[in-house]
Amino acid sequence: MHSTPRLTPHARRRSLALGLASILLLAIAAPRLHAQGCVPIKEMGDTSSAIDGVSTTGGGTDKWDLGESYEHFRSYLDFVGSQNNTPSRNAAGNQVINVVDQFDTAISYSWDPRDTVSLDVPYFSATRSQLVKGLGRFRTQSHDLGDMRIGVSRWLLDPATNPRGNISIGVGLSVPTGKSNVKDYFHTTTGLVYKNVDQSIQPGLGGWGYIGEFNAYYKVLPSTTLYANGFYMVTPQDVNGTQLGASTTSETAYDSVYDQYELRAGVTQQLWRCSHGVLDGSFGGRWEGVPSDDLIGRSDGFRRPGYVLSIEPGIAFVMPHDSVSLSVPVAEYMNRTQSYPDTLTGGHGDAFFAKFLVLISYSHRW
């Protein structure tokens, strides 16, 4: 009979760090700048810190994490409330189509296994196609840096002595470095008009944001882990000064600075393990949105509030110092809720949503 080889302390620490990093990569390693069609949800959570915090668990030496992430979607599904108006829009040929590519560069530093500080720099590129009766379709576009984010997070339990489960909490600041007044030429029946592009393809929000987030996991079996994470961003500023039309006195004359939120939960399962790393799969649910009313301050101005409920399958390969992941959230329920100005007039605007997103991320730890 052959006995099972015993791992050295160094090998045990390496195995623990690799396993826990793989647990959290699929759970939280998503691009930080996220939108959902005309409802401009921007993911602000400090996702890299949790991965880096785990990678240093149990005596690991990695303190820095450099991450690159990419997101792509095409929004074309028109909703008023939860009613799908896409068939009638398609029949009329007047649907609005947003195509968005978003990139994010994030760097984080863990000065100990529990505490991490991070900086995220996003880049936003989008086109918006719409119809002018009698003139056909035309496009507007924007390409620029988005709003940078600075964050700190802390594991509530010592990762070295609590490898089975943990919770981290974090706070962050969204800095209005992205432009919220990008302009382009619009085709009209009287000629070209140079004005601000639609709010949904503006790179920046135009105001400061204050972020609270959490990340949690619990290992129910040696190769099966539950996860949950989320964030809420508070924006006390009312409007950002980006004017929609000629009027400056209407309730929707300027773009609103709006709160945002996201909540995700699911399970990760180890699929394959080799000497080079771990292959994991994940499946979960995702709830994200823009509220009609902000937690702090007024909710005037133009916004398209709403929320999306999605299923989120994913896959990741985690190596000792490198990780790559792919997830494809698929929307199952979409709702364009009434904005505050809508409630004053009795109206109910629409919004275009994407059916699915493609999210790819890579990180290197050292």
Image: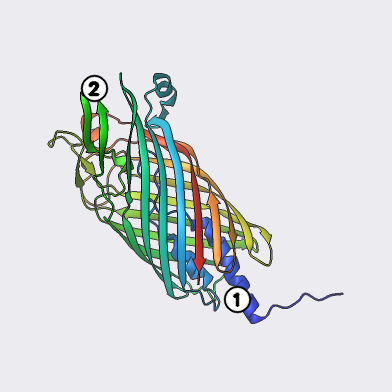
Number of other residues with Cα within 10 Å of mark 2, as a class: few under 14, some 14 to 19, many 20 or more: few
Residue placed at 46% from the left, 51% from the top? 70
Q: x and y percent of residue 264 in the render?
A: 47, 51
In this view of the protein, which residue sits in the foreground, 44 or 83? 44
222, above or below 145, in the image: below
Number of numbered markers: 2
| Quarter assignment of residue 198 | top left
52, above or below 192, in the image: below
In this view of the protein, which residue sits in the foreground, 27 or 278? 278
Number of other residues with Cα within 10 Å of mark 1, as a class: few under 14, some 14 to 19, many 20 or more: some
Residue 13's mark?
1
- Left or right? Give the position of 62 relative to 353: right
Task: Classify mark 2: helix, strand or loop.
Answer: loop
Q: x and y percent of residue 119 in the render?
A: 37, 64
The kind of residue tagged 1 is Arg
Q: Residue under label 2, please give it.
A: 189
The kind of residue tagged 2 is Thr
- Left or right? Give the position of 209 relative to 9: left
Residue placed at 41% from the left, 21% from the top? 88
Please, which residue is most extreme toward the right here? 1
